[in-house]
Amino acid sequence: MGDVPSAARNAPLVLLSGGGGGARLAAGLSQAPAERPLLVVTNTGDDFEHCGLSICPDTDSVLYAVSKTIDPQRGWGRAEESWSVFEALKNLGGPDWFQLGDKDLALHLSRSAMLAAGEDVAGVTTELGDRLGVPPHVTVVPATASPIRTHVISDQGKMAFQEYFVAHRCTPVLRHVVYEGIDSASPAERLSKALDDVGTAGTDVVLGPSNPFLSIAPILDIPDMQGLLRHAARRVVAVSPIIGGQALKGPTGKIMSELGLEVSAAGWTHWMSEHYPGLVDVWVWDETDQLAAGDLRAEGVDIRTTSTVMSDPARAAAFGDWLLRICEVDH
Amino acid sequence: MGDVPSAARNAPLVLLSGGGGGARLAAGLSQAPAERPLLVVTNTGDDFEHCGLSICPDTDSVLYAVSKTIDPQRGWGRAEESWSVFEALKNLGGPDWFQLGDKDLALHLSRSAMLAAGEDVAGVTTELGDRLGVPPHVTVVPATASPIRTHVISDQGKMAFQEYFVAHRCTPVLRHVVYEGIDSASPAERLSKALDDVGTAGTDVVLGPSNPFLSIAPILDIPDMQGLLRHAARRVVAVSPIIGGQALKGPTGKIMSELGLEVSAAGWTHWMSEHYPGLVDVWVWDETDQLAAGDLRAEGVDIRTTSTVMSDPARAAAFGDWLLRICEVDH
């Protein structure tokens, strides 16, 4: 272990996360033996209103993952879920394109009630986390309190993220992504405050293995976000969502290909470096992609490899532990 | 059977209804053998927003009653209901003062989705009725499309209807009732149109045995409502909510007493006559109150008595049948 100032070791690791791999990593980091404080910053571009309810899919997935209430097979929604309301909704001819489990619905109802009562997004998320049993060393914060709505421009026209992702199952060919509202958004106060608090010792920032266009960009593109993170970060570590030429789950590979990018860890690294120059210090690739790392390493790109596949909680915790150790050496 | 113009016999009977006795009567009238078209005008003063959802308790009770999906024991909500979401909501510390059954929730979600999509209140209600299986000769129409919110002024201050009715279980001493928004409301277009369509032959209007202050008044006090009903009505028949000196269910008796009224069918008749002079032609009292009718009858008040207790669907249908026959004679 290197020479780490103790303030930094206790400073919260900051993880930027979407709903899938990011949520798994959040769980892994939260369950690593070190119990280092963890601040998970969740993508809000997927948030939407459905049947009157405020639904925050990525934030919910992270809350469920770190409270161990997530369905481990599906990777989203609650474990031991039931579907009474959804069945009744279908019987009534109601909207059935977005699946609403009973326990999941209770969360949407609780959130909607608190928001209607005037509570702020960050406070509501913390309260829901407490109720779900998020461990005390973990804080989940939506990236911004301002509404951002991701829309995709596709060969079938412009559509809201959920329409593309759920109703159309990502089949339209994606040409461009826009994050409506992002220009007037600012980083969540709770995040700014936490990053202020780490002081000069700094902390570590991890970009989770989430979809770069649909989950990471709508966080990083919030005005002042990159500066805020870069200022507080001793080191920014980015985890590749591409393993062996494909995404484990979700449309990242398909989208990269539609955008004319090479579907590989290198293609992802190139895109990230171009779009966020100087932001990332360390690139984490899966060990499967080890051989392809040579060229970039020769150019001085700091690529580390390990097994990044989080197929069960033990593997996620092992990967989380590995990442925490990466963050604690070499300063 | 008297000399009834056939247009009038086919014209829809109009029933003004709250959620309890009114809904039972709606079911009784809808199930009477004559299958006379029935237009149920529901109180909207109880409507409210809960956890982001649009909830219309009286309209829902009537929809459930006439589609035979109502829980016959409780007299509200769906039969064969389950409570998965409500249990999960309580586990999350969410608001538990208003009970939300799973099937019931599906209706609130469907309504909220349709309203969010821009559909109008009357159209949404008809569509929900169709999906629930409301018989084709029955139409349910919320009294107005404009938001009305009933508030009670009590010894514990001013509170919204649901707070008084559900959260406080009607314990505060009621001094006054206000129907916020009613001054700028107007009768539902579908109701005006239906009453226009009956033409000069006219039709029959029944004021259900619902709470006069909390269910009937927020319909009748809508500007132009009384004129519209009176103009179209051959006869307005009002059914007493007070039987043998008390309300079968709900706070009508308690409220009458708090307002200084005699808790009796006569007390109710006096209050209605004072507040809505010239509106009611026929007063229907329960046979239990037969003896007390003498004084008013001597003054020329047209009081009819029968068994008005609708303790099961057969009794409700029998009472409905009796009312339909009342409407078809003596013109």
Image (tube, coloured by chain):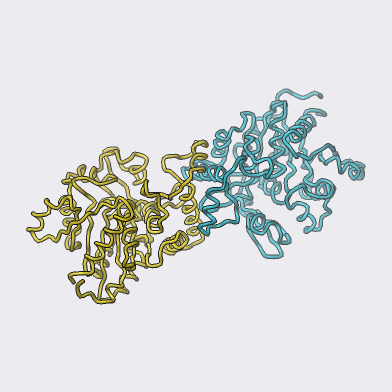
Chain colours: A cyan, B yellow
Percent position (x, y) of residue A226?
Answer: 71, 43
A232 lies above or below B29:
above
Whether residue B185 is visible to the viewer of this picture, yes or no, is no
Q: Would you say B176 lies left or right of A302 here? A: left
Question: Is B121 or A301 nearer to us in this picture?
Answer: B121
Percent position (x, y) of residue B178?
Answer: 29, 50
Whether residue B128 is visible to the viewer of this picture, yes or no, is yes
Question: Is B80 or B282 nearer to us in this picture?
Answer: B80
Q: Would you say A217 lies left or right of B210 here? A: right
B229 lies above or below A28:
below
Count of picture labels: 0
B311 lies above or below A65:
below
Q: Would you say B256 lies left or right of A203 here? A: left
Quarter in which the N terminus of chain A is drawn: top right
Q: Would you say B162 lies left or right of A250 here? A: left
Q: Residue at x 64, y 32 (%)?
A: A138
Question: Is B227 or A266 nearer to us in this picture?
Answer: B227
Q: Quadrant of residue B299?
A: bottom left
Quarter in which the C terminus of chain A is drawn: top right
Percent position (x, y) of residue B144?
Answer: 35, 61
Percent position (x, y) of residue B11?
Answer: 30, 72
Q: Residue at x 44, y 64 (%)?
A: B123
